[in-house]
Image (spheres, rainbow, N blue to C red):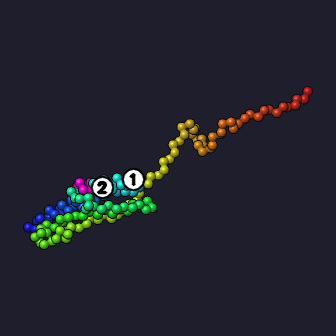
């Protein structure tokens, strides 16, 4: 009978592991966009784990750091009551649990600098980089030199 009950426990544990992976993946993708695990991302991850797995906040640990555009993160979730019939088999509560750990890293998502938009006032082929003349320094027409006329 214990083997039949253990199948249900295994399904429950597999569900919890899938939920953990899904929520950590979402948090990781958000962290890539933000440049690291912000307080809000970490708080949302913990809150979702508590809600979806019906566990205590004390059963969760989320740690992260960012170095050289690499985000290192470690999420630990205490999985309790993993064996069916633990009392019958004499397994203590402290032995009927384990910590599920996701310890990984990802690269911060970097976007290329946007290309400057072309100046709509320029003609095609006109150089956009040549400096504009300063007001008052514009070209002046020199006065014509007097010419001597021979008569």
Instruction: Indicate whether 87 appears above or below 47.
Output: below
Q: Is residue 72 left or right of residue 20?
A: right
N-term-proximal mark, 2 vs 1: 1
Q: Assign the N terminus to one quadrant of the image.
A: bottom left
For residue 2, what is the image quadrant? Answer: bottom left
Instruction: Indicate whether 116 appears above or below 38.
Output: above
Q: Residues within 10 Å of mark 2 (few under 14, many from 20)?
A: many
Query: Does residue 130 belong to the magenta stretch?
Result: no
Q: Is residue 19 visible?
A: no
- Looking at the picture, tell me which residue is in the foreground, 140 or 56: 56
| Magenta span | 48-52
Query: What element does badge 2 sit on?
Result: helix
Residue at 23% over, 55% down: 52
Disc 1: which residue: 33
- Looking at the picture, tell me which residue is in the foreground, 121 or 21: 21
Question: Which disc is residue 45 wearing?
Answer: 2
Query: What element does badge 1 sit on?
Result: helix
Nearest-to-viewer mark from 2 and 1: 2
Residue at 20% over, 69% down: 94
Residue 13 at x, y = what percent?
A: 20, 62
């Amino acid at each position: 009978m214990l083997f039949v009950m253990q199948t249900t426990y295994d399904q429950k544990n597999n569900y919890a592991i899938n939920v953990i992976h899904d929520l950590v993946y979402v948090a990781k993708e958000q962290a890539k966009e933000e440049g690291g695990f912000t307080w809000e991302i970490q708080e949302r991850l913990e809150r979702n784990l508590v809600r979806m797995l019906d566990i205590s906040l004390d059963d969760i640990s989320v740690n992260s750091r960012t170095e050289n555009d690499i985000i290192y993160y470690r999420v630990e979730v205490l999985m309790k009551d993993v064996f069916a019939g633990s009392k019958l088999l004499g397994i203590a509560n402290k032995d009927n649990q384990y910590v599920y750990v996701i310890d990984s890293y990802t690269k911060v998502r970097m976007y290329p600098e946007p290309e400057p938009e072309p100046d709509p006032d320029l003609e095609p082929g006109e150089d956009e980089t040549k400096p504009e003349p300063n007001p008052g320094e514009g070209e002046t027409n020199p006065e014509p030199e007097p010419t001597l006329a021979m008569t």
